[in-house]
Amino acid sequence: MEGLETVSSTAICIRILQVLIGSFIYIFLITRIVGQENKAKWFRRRSKYTFFNRRGIFGEYIHYGYPICWQGLAVFFIIYGVIFAFGYWYIFVCKY
């Protein structure tokens, strides 16, 4: 692993944006695989919405809520574990 001080800030920014866009695509795919029925059974959604925590159509589609069973926890750790592991590897370990 080389030090990031030798890498241009533009290259780091591009990789962070790629991880961000890839994360949204990955969450959309997991949402399609899990399905709306299982998502409703495994997660509890917020019941009170205000102006500050409303989401658009894509935000509501990928919003899971709070896990309420072991399947929900498994989906949560699969989503965020893969995103964190890939992001760390792609930004800090993979050669520029």
Image (tube, rainbow, N blue to C red):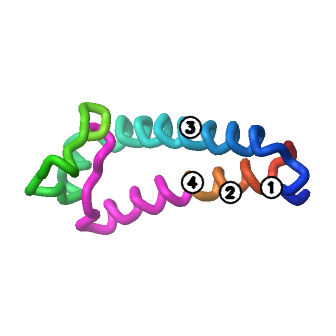
Work out whether 49 lies above or below 73: above
Residue span colored magenta: 61-82
Local packing at callout 4 (Cα closer than 10 Å; few below 14, some 14-19, many 20+) is few
Gap in Å between the C-alphas at discs 1 and 4? 15 Å
Q: Are marks 1 and 2 in contact (CB under 8 Å)?
A: yes
Q: Callout 1 environment at 10 Å: few (<14), some (14 to 19), or many (20+)? A: some
Q: Position of residue 3 (x, y in %)?
A: 88, 59
Q: Position of residue 65 (x, y in %)?
A: 25, 56
Number of other residues with Cα within 10 Å of mark 3, as a class: few under 14, some 14 to 19, many 20 or more = some
Whichever of labels 2 and 3 marks the residue nearer the N terminus, that label is 3
Amino acid bearing label 4? Val
Residue 89 rendering spot, x and y as whole percentages: 73, 54
Report how far apart the C-alphas of labels 2 and 3 lie in the structure.
Answer: 13 Å
Left or right of 41: which side holds 63? right
Kindly identify the amino acid type of the residue bearing the numbered disc 1. Val
Name the N-terminal-most of marks 4 and 2. Answer: 4
Amino acid type, residue under disc 2 in the picture = Tyr
Residue behind mark 1:
93
Dividing the picture into quadrants, the one containing residue 10 is: top right
Depth check, front residue: 3 or 60: 3
Q: Position of residue 5 (x, y in %)?
A: 86, 56
Mark toward the start of the polypeptide (1 vs 3): 3
User: Label 2: which residue?
Assistant: 88
Reading the image, the residue beneath label 4 is: 82
Q: CA distance from mark 4 to mark 2?
A: 10 Å
Outermost residue to the top = 57
The residue to which callout 3 is attached is 22
Residue in the image at 23% along x and 58% along y: 43
Q: Residue at horizontal 61%, vertical 39%? A: 17
